[in-house]
Amino acid sequence: MAAPQQEEDSPCPACGVSPSKIRELTDKVEELGREISGLKRRLSLYENSNSPPSKNSRLYMELRRSRRKEGEGGGAAPRKPGRKDGHQGAT
């Protein structure tokens, strides 16, 4: 009776890991998978792909900073609203 149990716990000839260790690692992987799916579900409550990012978000601040640097470094004058100087109105 001890022989089948001993044979079951013998390490795998290919990788050298015992079946009990494999079961333990499999259980850990399943537990982490459940935790990840729970975290994704909780995160999805706060995400809305139809709305723009917040103006306080890091991504928005980096985009704004890069645009400001582009405007400072280039030779073109900054754009201003309204008609161009020297152009008359259409009406």
Image (spheres, rainbow, N blue to C red):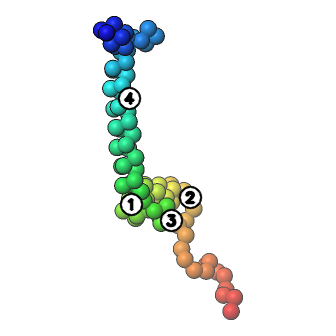
In the picture, the quarter occupied by the N terminus is: top left
Q: With respect to residue 85, does 38 lie above or below?
A: above
Residue 63 in the image, given as x and y percentages of width and height:
46, 57
Disc 4 to disc 3, C-alpha distance:
38 Å
Residue farthest to the left?
2
Disc nearer the start of the sequence (3/2): 3
- Label for residue 23? none
Residue 46 in the image, given as x and y percentages of width and height:
38, 60
Residue 4 in the image, given as x and y percentages of width and height:
36, 11
Disc 3 to disc 2, C-alpha distance:
37 Å
Which is nearer the eye, 11 or 42?
11
- Label for residue 26? 4
Mark 1 vs mark 4: give the one in front. Answer: 4
Q: With respect to residue 28, does 37 lie above or below?
A: below
- Label for residue 46? 1
Badge 4 density bin: few <14, some 14–19, many ≥20, Cα 10 Å: few
Q: Amino acid at mark 2?
A: Gly
- Label for residue 50? 3
Badge 2 density bin: few <14, some 14–19, many ≥20, Cα 10 Å: few
Q: Amino acid at mark 1?
A: Tyr
Disc nearer the start of the sequence (4/3): 4
Mark 4 vs mark 3: give the one in front. Answer: 4
Mark 1 vs mark 2: give the one in front. Answer: 1
